[in-house]
Image (cartoon, grey):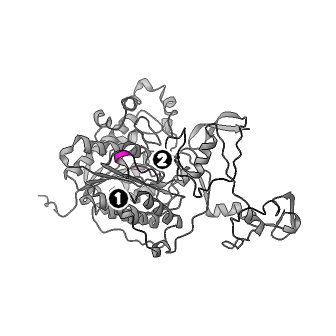
Amino acid sequence: MEAPEDPRRRRVGLLYDERMCRHATPDGESHPENPERIRAIWLKLESEGIPQRCVVLRAKEAEDKYIALVHTQSHIKLIRNISSKEFDSQRLRIASKFNSIYFNKGSSEAAYLAAGSVVEVSEKVAKGDLDSAIAIVRPPGHHAESDEAMGFCLFNNVAIAANFLLNERPELGIRKILIVDWDVHHGNGTQNMFYKDPRVLFFSIHRFDFGSFYPAGDGGSYCMVGEGAGAGYNINVPWEHGQCGDADYLAVWDHVLLPVAESYNPDIILISAGFDAAVRDPLGGCCITPYGYSLMLKKLMGFAQGKIVMTLEGGYNLNSIANSVLACAKVLLEEKPLVGSIEVQPFESTWRVIQEVRHELKTFWPALAVELPQNVLASNGRPCPVELNLSSSSESDLGSDGEASSTVCSSKFVEIIEPLSKLNIDEDNQGKAIVSNHSPAEQTPVISSEECRNAQALVPDNSVDGCISWRSVLSNIEVWYASYGSNMWKPRFLCYIEGGKVEGMNKPCPGSRDKSSPKDVIWKTVPHRLFLCKISHPDMGQRRCCFSSS
């Protein structure tokens, strides 16, 4: 006879299905979003005995009528049929039309199982059959738009589940849903699906890098707050750079997310749980530890009576995602939490972003109108990390070693610029460059004192971090902006500096950090040619490339 179930133990649903591993790249090419991601998570949980302490569920496919709550019929038809035999000869060509997408014979089934699984566990948590749940699903969903696949995502799993609870199961009493997207990439698809809907409070914390980080553009800016009835119900926290970690995320939790969540009082919380902001992730470049994720989740359990559904999104380092999901599972089970500590302070830029977000939303959420204490803002914020951004237009560009090739950080950057930092300017030598030991360099004029006599001083003359200081003449160099492109024109260029929206832009642009208008703008039309070619990438196979010559 089995022992009676402990009524005090939280009932946590755990869903995993090997059939979702059938979605893989054609011909087995290497790719960051691959079946080993969910296998690694499941093996880690099994090794720790987690399934034995959870309610294990099997995936079921979503019904088209529920998918149609957020996706167009043409998109549903494509995903339903893309794995059929009739598409064998067209699959590669169709995939190439989308941003960072692949299809194979298992893609349709996996997409339907992923969406159906999130609907299934969300309904059980909303009913009270489960206290919370973890859906270990793939392909991920938060980039998928209503009418197209994007960024490894075919169906928007979390958005489908949210709409299902709101529109198909009103008897469950779910009137307000908080979606927390902590994937390192902005959840553009989810944002767009609920942008005018006050029944969903969408919160996304992500790398933005002033619009250059995937999925790029202005959509992830803090000024995107929703429209119409949904104004104020869309919250973006856009990091200015990588390397953000536990301290940065928890500062945002304490000073943005939690005050708003308390005011909103959601009935259920759906987490788009990407783990690509984790330490050593090859695409994210951030530093959240498993302990950090456990704290982020623990703080959310104080809302919605702990009704939380955690759905896997991104995360591409197998050890990181496995350990992070394990830490979160232990939190949901209310077992002894991980032991850890956070010794570093948030970045200076983190406090700046927090203040910008609070200022943008304070008219909607009075809790954010209170000024942050000065002792908090002045509490040893770390300087921003130095990065040389070599970003690509796709999430999927990895180097041959499997590590991120998009950013050269800190020590690498120093290796690049250190020789430049040792340059000096001899004002008595007509502005010609000489190295710091005063031996002559090439006789190429850099800048003369006369040329920049009236320029604004932007750089201090003192030494920074032990580097040899620049001579005072260099502190008078003016800042130059430059841009080109077939879709660029003068008002749009100025908009990127000053902020706002002009013809040809779908959404407002937040502008640069310094929104001062340029003293002058020179605008020219330059003839140019485009060269198209194919290149072979060691990990991603054949890719198209475009070069410009002017």
The residue wearing badge 1 is 47
* Residue 138 in the image, given as x and y percentages of width and height: 39, 44
Query: Which residue occupies the foreground of this view, 470 or 180?
Result: 470
Residue type beneath disc 1:
Ser
Residue at horizontal 39%, vertical 29%?
74
Residue type beneath disc 2:
Gly
Inter-mark Cα distance, 1 to 2: 40 Å
User: Quadrant of the image for the C terminus?
Assistant: top right
Q: Is residue 236 left or right of residue 518?
A: left
Residue at the left extreme, as displayed: 1
Query: Which residue occupies the foreground of this view, 204 or 153?
Result: 204
Q: Earlier in the sequence, mark 1 or mark 2?
A: 1
Asked if residue 400 can be seen in this view, the reply is: no
* Residue 46 in the image, given as x and y percentages of width and height: 33, 56
Asked if the residue under mark 2 is in contact with the one under mark 1, i.e. CB atoms within 8 Å, the reply is no
Residue at the top extreme, as displayed: 86
Q: Which residues are magenta?
A: 223-229
Element type at mark 1: helix
* Residue 369 in the image, given as x and y percentages of width and height: 39, 64
Q: Nearer the viewer, mark 1 or mark 2?
A: 2
Element type at mark 2: loop
| Rendered view: 528 above or below 413 | above
Residue at horizontal 42%, vertical 69%?
371
The residue wearing badge 2 is 219
